[in-house]
Amino acid sequence: MADNLDFLESESIHIIREVAASFANPVMMYSIGKDSAVMLHLAMKAFHPGKPGFPLLHVDTTWKFGEMITFRDAEVKRLGVKLITHINPNGIENGVGPFSHGSKVHTDVMKTEGLKQALKAHKFDAAFGGARRDEEKSRAKERVFSFRNAAQQWDPKNQRPELWNLYNTEISKGESVRVFPLSNWTELDVWRYILREKISLVPLYFAKERPIVIRDGMMIMVDDDRIPLEPDEKPMMKRVRFRTLGCYPLTGAIESDATTVEEIITELEQDRTSERQGRMIDHDQIGAMEQKKREGYF
Amino acid sequence: MPQSKNDALPRLRFLTCGSVDDGKSTLIGRLLYESSSVLDDQMDAVANESSKFGTQGDSVDLALLLDGLQAEREQGITIDVAYRYFSTKQRSFIAADAPGHEQYTRNMATAASNSDLAILLVNAKSGLLPQTRRHARIVSLLGVRHCILAVNKMDLVGHDEKTFTQIADEFQTFAKALEFQSINSVPVSALNGDNLFTASQHMPWYKGSSLIDLLETIKIETGQAQAPFRMPVQYVNRPNSEYRGFCGTVASGSVKVGEEIVVLPSAKTTRVKEIAGPSGTVETASSNQAITLLLEDEIDISRGDIIAAVDAPTAVADQIAAHIVWMDEASMLPERPYTIRFHSMSCIAQVTDLVHRIDTNTGKKIASKKLELNEIGYCKLSLDREAAFDSYSENRQTGSFVLIDRYTNATVGAGVIDFALRRASNIHWQETRVDKEQRARMNDQKPCLLWFTGFSGSGKSTIADRLEQRLQSLGRRTYLLDGDNVRHGLNHDLGFTDQDRVENIRRVAEVAKLMVDAGLIVLVSFISPFKAEREMARGLVADDEFHEIFVDTPLEVCEARDIKGLYKKARAGELKNFTGIDSDYEVPENPEILLKGAEEEIDVLVDQVLTKLGIN
């Protein structure tokens, strides 16, 4: 009998194929994290024995963990898929970064604006994202096929009703959709699927001794020398791992001994905090995520 | 966060519905909280927001866990469906929190479309409300077969047994007319948690199961697995010339390697050569699996076809009868073309007949000319091609559709198919030997349709009349269909409401099409205010035969002219639905010919048309 993971897997493959059949120029947002890894794995299955007919897009903020970039390049090579990377040139010109400009400006410019630039430049009409509805409250109401106007904005009050598994794929010129094949997955579903399918991940998800400093109550890993340290400050070595991955200065580590997927699942089953807790950008203001999504963030 | 260890019971998808303030969000919030699905930092955030938006004084408002959008938090109501995920040791759940306000009924229908069970909340203090009945009807119509009546806020009626029994009995009586297979009633207090996870100490008289017990143990027999095999073809996978795989999700039943299948609508048959599941080749596949089928014979199959069991094919027709829930601010007009979206195919559909509207409060059938937002109607639809489908009662996946506006691309309606209409298969096209080309040759001209549109008084008819005279003098065979004149005869039964205007244009367009077919140059002079109908007319003839001529005379000029005195009447309120005054005119975006009616002499305008047509 089909179990919950089989059901989720088939539902996601259905969504991915629907995009391939209905849109002229789709792209898959690839953020290198565990959700992207699962989404990519599902896309490989959806078109087997062929390859996905669309490229991956990574919007590089230039502040990702170094290990993420190494992993990304190795995966793309291993799977033989096409990768487009984009860095917002305006951000580079103005030297935008999380330390100099704060998390909000950095994310707005390097992530949201960068993403919009890339989608516009390549005229993508559908973009897959790995977001799940259980992540955050405003995501809980987002459609699987989420319409964006020509300015790439989301209007939460005017969303298309989505019934059965009938997705409205009709758009006019310049408009686009964001598609979320993992909408109905929970964080635990993702980990159980990673275990079952033996999906490879960035090593940062697993516990290891790493150099840590404390910023705004979060354990931040010293990934390179761009992080400003106090005159006498010495990073401490702690056994930590990450529940989500993003820009290293904005991503909090958790203390953990979990070195395998099984151990992570056990840890999650007993855990009392949500994965987005380690995300600084969600806490900027009440309704922070909804605001970001209206503006075009995933 | 515990997760179901026992995956033998499939995940249960349910929705909560009921009237405003019956406590739906609080109930799901409580279910999440008690099943330990709410994490510490989420709880902290809710506690933080409770002091700002909460409606529960100093205590934590659990409804804030669900009301995700800022507008909802500020207004304290739920305006969209929120999906929530939680598990107990027995089962995993997806809960859809559907809005209670009448104007958001469409979102409730959305939540119901994917649910197997509905928790219908009733406030013990107010009893069954029209809203409760309305929601029960919609939920039943959308195929939800299990219902739990949660009589909430029992604390407000002193946990009184009689109050509960009365409400439960009243609902049972009412629901006899609906199609629920099971109805369970539970007295609860979502705020305090009574009878949600454990038996309530306040209501020792209640001997039934707690809400969570019911949710964990209810068996959902959809019959999907036992139904005949159906797989709508979603995508054709051709990575190389040797491989031709038909991808799709099994909608019902199962399929085995070697089995004979039929492809619909073509009715061609072949056998299954290989089945590729998500994790490789399999011998058999069953409902809800995303698979790829390889077939023995090379037959023509494309997206939108259904592959089915050979001994139990789907219906194939271009006419269907269906219930439609209308979801758009702009009302549904019979005869207006919409894009219809089935399982994996799209085509153009028109509602040919709105048989009746259903009063969702009373269940009564009411005669109606259009459907407004949140109304449900029983309709006959005509498709522009044959499609394969089932009735919704047989199959939710292949028996449902949505309607999409062709210009805004909004999802405007949702339909559940009742049955295929036989009419389609009994009326065939009679093949005729003499065709349009031959008739055109006899007339020694290229037939076409000149469609004049513009405000009343814009000069359409005057220009068309002068143009026809010029064409006649050049030896062309013509006919002028004038709006006013046609309304004296063919369309004398039609008024000026939106739906009558649509039908008015449809008839004229069909007549014009026949005349073009007969080889004539046809001039149509109609206000034709709606883009949808002008496009419909365009679609009836060949691309190069249709010329939209927009007589662009400003409304002020038309009103100042007021040759027929109609604007005066309309301004005085004596004439309703007058275009430009109290009825809209949708300006053509890309007319083939644009005439500035206020700026040029009539003969100059006529010359402009002739030049564009290459006649002169």
Image (spheres, rainbow, N blue to C red):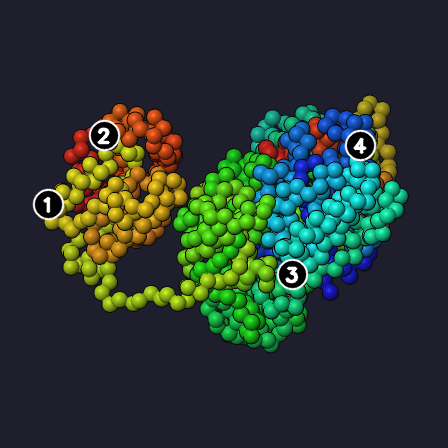
Quick check: do tags 1 and 3 share a chain?
Answer: yes
Residue in the image at 56% along x and 74% along y: B311
Q: CA distance from mark 2 to mark 1?
A: 28 Å
| N-term mark: 4 or 1 | 4
- Check disc 2 and give the amino acid type: Ile
- Check disc 3 and give the amino acid type: Asn
Q: Nearer the viewer, residue B316 or B606?
A: B316
Q: Indicate which disc residue B473 carries.
A: 1
Residue A11 location in percent, x, y?
Answer: 64, 55
Mark 4 lies on residue: B60
Instruction: Examine the image and state in which quarter residue B41 appears.
Output: top right
Instruction: Examine the image and state in which quarter residue B250 appears.
Output: bottom right
- Check disc 1 and give the amino acid type: Ser
Circle 2 Cα neighbour tier, 10 Å, few/some/many (<14 / 14–19 / ≥20): few
Q: CA distance from mark 1 to mark 3?
A: 68 Å
Provide the secondary structure element on which disc 3 rests. Answer: loop
Contact between labelled residues 3 and 4, with CB atoms less than 8 Å apart: no
Q: Indicate which disc residue B288 carries.
A: 3
Instruction: Give the position of the C terminus of chain B as an image quadrant.
Output: top left
Q: CA distance from mark 4 to mark 3?
A: 40 Å
Which of the chains bears the disc numbered 2? B
| N-term mark: 4 or 3 | 4
Quick check: do tags 3 and 2 share a chain?
Answer: yes
Residue in the image at 77% along x and 43% along y: B163
Which of the chains bears the disc numbered 3? B
Q: Nearer the viewer, mark 4 or mark 2?
A: 2
Q: Nearer the viewer, mark 3 or mark 2?
A: 2
Mark 2 lies on residue: B563
| N-term mark: 2 or 1 | 1
| N-term mark: 1 or 3 | 3
